[in-house]
Amino acid sequence: MANHKNNERYQRQITLKELGEIGQLKLKEAKVLVVGAGGLGCPALLYLAGAGIGKLGIIDFDQVTLSNLHRQVIFSVHDIGLSKALRAADVLEQINPDIDIIAFNEKLNNRNALDILKNFDIILDGTDNFESRYLINDACVLLKKTLVYGAISRFEGQLAVFNHPSEIKTAVNYRDLFPQEPTDGEVLNCEEAGVIGVLPGIIGTMMANETIKLITHIGDALVNRLLTYNSLNNHFFEMELSANPETAMMIPRDADAFRAYQYDWFCSTNSAFDLVPEQFQEMIKDKNTQLVDVREAGEGPELADFNAIHIPLSRLQQQIPDIESTNIILFCRSGKRSKVAAEILSRHFGRSKKIYSLKDGIASWHKF
C-alpha cells in the first residue's frame, strides 16, 4: 500500500489493527460478484466499492423504476428506465475509480452462471426469488465458491454464509435451509408483501460486512449460521445450520446436469409432487404407473398389495432406473425421502414423466 492516494483513501480501515495494510491488500486482491443491484445489492455494492474490493462484479438485467427508489440507494429519479447494472457501475466508478468494476447487463441463468461465477471468489445473493436463489446456490456448490446470502420481507431480514470451507464442519448450503421450495403464497417477495425501505440497507450492509470479514479473516463470520433481524423491535435471532446428506443429492452433479436443470419448473411445480392417499389408491391401478420404494432394506410396513421397484434413496442418484411408464410414484415411510427422490427423478427425466411423492408416506396410506 505504498501509494499515498490509496493510503489516504483507506486510512480509517488501515488504522484498525485487526485489518491493517495486510488486510487492505487482501481486499484489493479480492474478486466479489453481487447478483442483483436491488435493495440488498445497492448498499452492499456501495460499501464494497468504498472498502476497496479490487474486482467488483454486478449482474442485473432489470431497469430502474420509480418504485425502486425508496430502497435502492444507488439510483435517482434521473436513472429511471436505465439499466441497473450499467448505471450502478457508473456510480461506483465515481466513488472509487481505483477498482475494477464489471457490469453484466443480463439475467443470470443456468446457461451463463458457471462461466460468470467462476471468475469471482465470493458471491453475494441479493435476489428476491427462489428460482435465482437455488440456481446461485447450486452454481456456488459446483464451483466451490463462498455464498453470502441475504433476504428481506416486510420488516424482517435474514443473513447467512453458505458453502464456505471449514476445518470443523461440513459446509452448509442454501438447500439445507430450504430443502423444498415453499409453495405458492407461503413466502411472499417484496413486491407482494412490501418492505420498509431501511431494512434492505441494514441487511445489505451486513452482507458487505460479512464479505469483508471473510476476505480479511477477521471477526466471526456467519459461516453455517443464520441470523434473523426484526426491524420493528430490533431483535436478533441466530441459529446453527447443519448439512443434510439428502439435500446434497438434490444439487446437479456436474456442469452438464446444472445446465439441463429446469429451475423455473422446479420452483413453480414443486407442490405438484404431493399425492394424497386417495389419489395414490386410484393411481396404483393404472397400468401406466410405476411405483418406486425408496426406503432402506427391512423398513416396514411390508406390502403385498402392489409391486414396486425398490431403490433406497441413498443409492437413487447413482442407480436411476430405466422406467417406461409415464407416471412414477415414489414412497417412503413418512414422505420426506420420497419428496427428495421425486426431485432427483424430475431432474433426470424432465417433463417426459409425471413424478409424484406419496404425501405422509406409506405408513399413512397403510392406515387409510
Image: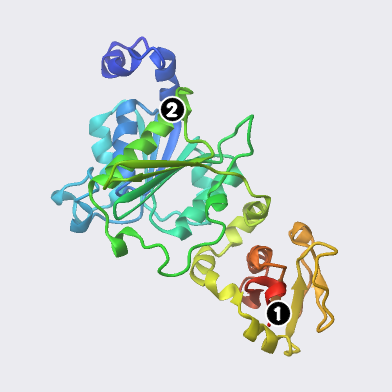
User: Which x, y percent locates residue 6?
Assistant: 30, 17
Judged from the image, the secondary structure of the residue bearing numbered disc 1 is helix
Q: Is 338 or 237 nearer to us in this picture?
A: 237
Asked if one can make out residue 124 in the rendered structure from this viewpoint, the answer is no
User: Which x, y percent locates residue 213?
Assistant: 43, 27
- Image quadrant of residue 143? top right
- Image quadrant of residue 307? bottom right
Numbered tag placed on residue 213 in the rendering: 2
- The number of callouts visible is 2
User: Which x, y percent locates residue 144?
Assistant: 59, 40
Taking the image as shown, residue 134 lies to the left or right of residue 11, namely: right
Quarter of the image for the C terminus: give it. Answer: bottom right
- Image quadrant of residue 346? bottom right
Quarter of the image for the N terminus: give it. Answer: top left
Q: Nearer the viewer, mark 2 or mark 1?
A: 1
How packed mark 2 is, by other alpha carbons closer than 10 Å (few <14, some 14-19, many 20 or more), is some
> Between marks 2 and 1, how big is the CA–CA gap?
54 Å
> At label 2, which amino acid type do we have?
Lys
Numbered tag placed on residue 280 in the rendering: none
Judged from the image, the secondary structure of the residue bearing numbered disc 2 is helix
How packed mark 1 is, by other alpha carbons closer than 10 Å (few <14, some 14-19, many 20 or more), is few
Q: Earlier in the sequence, mark 2 or mark 1?
A: 2
Numbered tag placed on residue 367 in the rendering: 1
Q: Give above or below for 272 relative to 339.
A: below
User: Which x, y percent locates residue 264?
Assistant: 49, 66
Q: Give above or below for 122 relative to 290.
A: above
> At label 1, which amino acid type do we have?
Lys
Asked if one can make out residue 149 in the rendered structure from this viewpoint, the answer is yes
Taking the image as shown, residue 245 lies to the left or right of residue 108, namely: right
Q: Give above or below for 38 relative to 309.
A: above
